[in-house]
């Protein structure tokens, strides 16, 4: 214990290589990492599907000059990963902490933080780059710092206005990268000072390639068609798709069980308890049903039952049938958002419904979706949605 507080003794122990950390510990921590973090891009060339953005940034990397940047697009498309990969290539591991400040939505980012923490880091003098042989060749270490503001669209208007002045004043030694999902929530004076990069949802080809690559590295066997279902359930969000894949692999026992120290057998026993198909658990193969269960996809039979109840009928019998089906769905715990999504696709693909009726139904879906986002009651929202669709199909509105 005395050595712990003796800094000289600790430095001497580190120099002699008598540290208590073992190489196996690093390997174990990597293996226990979530796959989203484990396979996060380390370099710009690892970023999937954002070719235009990567090409532009690689050219700025060669020139060692960077504008203020605004990354926007749907979640899970690689915005944060791209700027972190760029920062690692620019500064290397030794200079990252001194030259890069990252603030996420979980941090307090009101006007006081912009005036204090962000401003203090922005005006801080640059530290000298390491003089180690070859370090400068691998990492350019340009003469500016980078401040990354993730989820910038959640910042208040006052905080964004205060940030505008800071960006102007310290632009010689500091570059800002704003990351958001909705570019319309960034005030115009701030957006006009940044080069905009739009991150689009991953197309099926790139997402499929990445998921298959991760599954191969982790030794996860996939049933035919599983990758397509993963991409469909994730809706272009690669982070969500990788998380579903890891959950499914754990479920069928493809990942070793750390508690028992065993291989697939420990995971297989857990899978049996969770009512996974015995054949799938025995072969450690991820099936389409497992992915749909993890993603909360509603069975087609349930959606068809709801559609059947919505069909126009004589008298006021529609309400009784629809109300019962909706009540059962809510009692089963199905997400209202998932009901809306799947019912929307089912209605649009129904060729028996006239186009004029589909136009009216689409407006109803958009209105109910907005209510759900704003936090409306799920049971009442779904009941209202289905009854209004039923009236449109009956020609009452």
Image (tube, grey):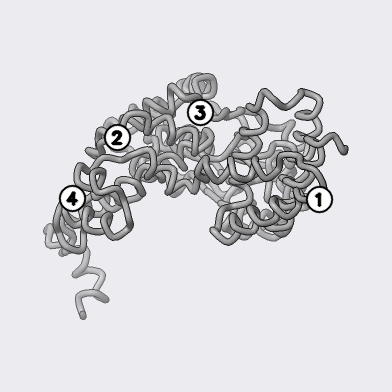
Circle 1 SS class: loop
**Between marks 1 and 2, how big is the CA–CA gap?**
48 Å
Mark 3 burial class by Cα count in 10 Å: few <14, some 14-19, many 20+: many
Towards the viewer: 324 or 107: 324
**Between marks 4 and 2, how big is the CA–CA gap?**
15 Å
Q: Which residue is mark 1?
A: 316
| Comes first in the chain, label 4 or label 2 | 2
Q: Position of residue 227 (x, y in %)?
A: 38, 31
Is residue 232 shown left or right of residue 340? left
**Between marks 1 and 4, how big is the CA–CA gap?**
56 Å
**Between marks 3 and 4, how big is the CA–CA gap?**
32 Å
Is residue 56 shown left or right of residue 94? right
| Comes first in the chain, label 1 or label 4 | 4
Circle 2 SS class: strand
Residue 78 can be seen in this image:
no
Give the number of the disc on residue 202. Answer: 3
Q: Which residue is mark 4?
A: 264
Circle 3 SS class: loop
Instruction: Please name the residue shown 43% across and 24% down the image.
Output: 206
Q: Which residue is mark 2?
A: 222
């Amino acid at each position: 214990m005395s050595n712990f507080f003796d800094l000289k003794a600790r430095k001497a122990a580190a120099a002699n290589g008598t540290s208590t950390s073992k190489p196996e510990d690093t390997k174990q921590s990597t293996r226990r990492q979530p796959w989203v973090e484990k396979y996060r891009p380390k370099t710009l060339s690892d970023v999937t599907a954002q070719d235009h953005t990567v090409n532009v940034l690689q050219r700025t990397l060669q020139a060692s000059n960077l504008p203020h940047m605004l990354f926007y697009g749907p979640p899970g498309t690689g915005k944060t990963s791209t700027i972190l990969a760029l920062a690692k290539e620019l500064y290397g591991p030794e200079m990252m902490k001194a030259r890069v400040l990252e603030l996420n939505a979980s941090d307090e980012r009101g006007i006081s933080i912009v005036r204090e923490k962000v401003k203090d880091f922005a005006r801080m003098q640059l530290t000298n780059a390491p003089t180690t042989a070859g370090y400068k060749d691998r990492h350019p270490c340009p003469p500016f710092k980078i401040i990354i503001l993730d989820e910038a669209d959640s910042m208040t208007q006052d905080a964004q206005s205060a940030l505008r002045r800071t960006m102007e004043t310290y632009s010689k030694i500091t570059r800002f990268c704003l990351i958001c999902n909705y570019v319309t929530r960034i005030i115009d004076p701030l957006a006009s000072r940044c080069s905009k990069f739009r991150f689009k949802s991953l197309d099926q080809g790139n997402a499929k390639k990445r998921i298959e690559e991760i599954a191969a590295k982790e030794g996860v066997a996939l049933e035919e068609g599983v990758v397509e279902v993963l991409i469909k359930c994730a809706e272009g969000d690669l982070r969500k798709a990788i998380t579903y894949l890891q959950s499914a692999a754990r479920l069928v026992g493809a990942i070793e069980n750390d508690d028992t120290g065993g291989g697939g057998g420990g995971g297989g026993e857990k899978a049996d308890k969770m009512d996974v198909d015995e054949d799938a658990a025995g072969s450690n193969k991820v099936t389409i049903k497992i992915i749909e269960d993890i993603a909360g996809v509603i069975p087609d039979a349930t959606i068809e039952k709801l559609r059947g109840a919505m069909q126009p009928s004589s008298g006021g019998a529609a309400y009784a049938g629809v109300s019962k089906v909706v009540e059962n769905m809510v009692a089963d715990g199905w997400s209202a958002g998932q009901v809306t999504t799947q019912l929307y696709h089912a209605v649009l693909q129904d060729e028996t419904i006239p186009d004029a009726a589909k136009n009216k139904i689409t407006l109803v879906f958009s209105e109910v979706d907005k209510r759900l986002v704003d936090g409306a009651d799920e049971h009442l929202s779904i009941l209202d949605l289905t009854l209004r669709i039923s009236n449109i199909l009956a020609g009452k509105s």
